[in-house]
Amino acid sequence: MRRYENVKIDKLKPYENNARTHSPEQIEKIAKSIEQFGFINPVLIDGDYGIIAGHGRVEGAKQLGMTEVPCIFVEDLTETQKRAYILADNKLTLDAGWDDLILKEELQALEDLNFDITLTGFEEYDISDINIDGFFEQAGEQKEKEPKKIQCPHCGEWFEE
């Protein structure tokens, strides 16, 4: 049985081979999200307080001056399963797509309600840039989508894909 517990941040141990990186800008967004919505998504940890999932959330909590975070103890995985899950937890979400029409409607609705959509991780320009045909609209013209930027997990440098 897995247990839920608030754990002091200074007891948590980041996974030293965590391949996922978090930029200062992303940590800032995570911190603002925690501030707005609370700490909804617990950190997954093993019996030795090693972080399995939630490194970015822990950093965001630290930035807010939090001393404890909600955690779920996942003590039934083997070491191999933990290593694999640390990768899977991050990669599987990246493989998801967006329904651009619904996304645009949802972001626009939040903006119409005077909600700061940057708290969702999106920026103001994202609303106008979303087009169901997969193109950016600008000044009544369509142009091809800008190249996607990716961050090197080793050096932190940003590159166009």
Image: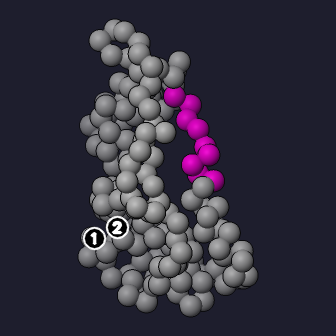
Magenta stretch in the rendered image:
92-100
Magenta segment includes 87: no
**x, y percentage for residue 77?**
72, 79
Say which of 83 and 159 sits in front: 159
As drawn, the label of residue 1 is none
Amino acid marked by disc 2: Gly
Q: Are marks 1 and 2 in contact (CB under 8 Å)?
A: yes
Place residue 56 in its image quadrant. bottom left
Rate crowding at label 1 as few (under 14), some (14 to 19) or many (20 or more) other CA atoms within 10 Å. some
Query: Which of the two residues, 105 or 123, is positioned nearer the viewer here?
Result: 123
Q: Residue at x 41, y 21 (%)?
A: 136
Residue for point 64% across, 61% down = 88
Q: Which residue is mark 2?
A: 60
State whether residue 123 is above or below residue 38. above
- Observer able to see residue 109: no
Q: Residue at x 26, y 37 (%)?
A: 114
Q: Position of residue 45 (x, y in %)?
A: 56, 80
* Secondary element type, mark 1: helix
Give the number of the disc on residue 63.
Answer: 1
On screen, residue 125 versus residue 49, left or right, reads: left
Tell me how far mark 1 sits from mark 2, CA to CA. Answer: 5 Å
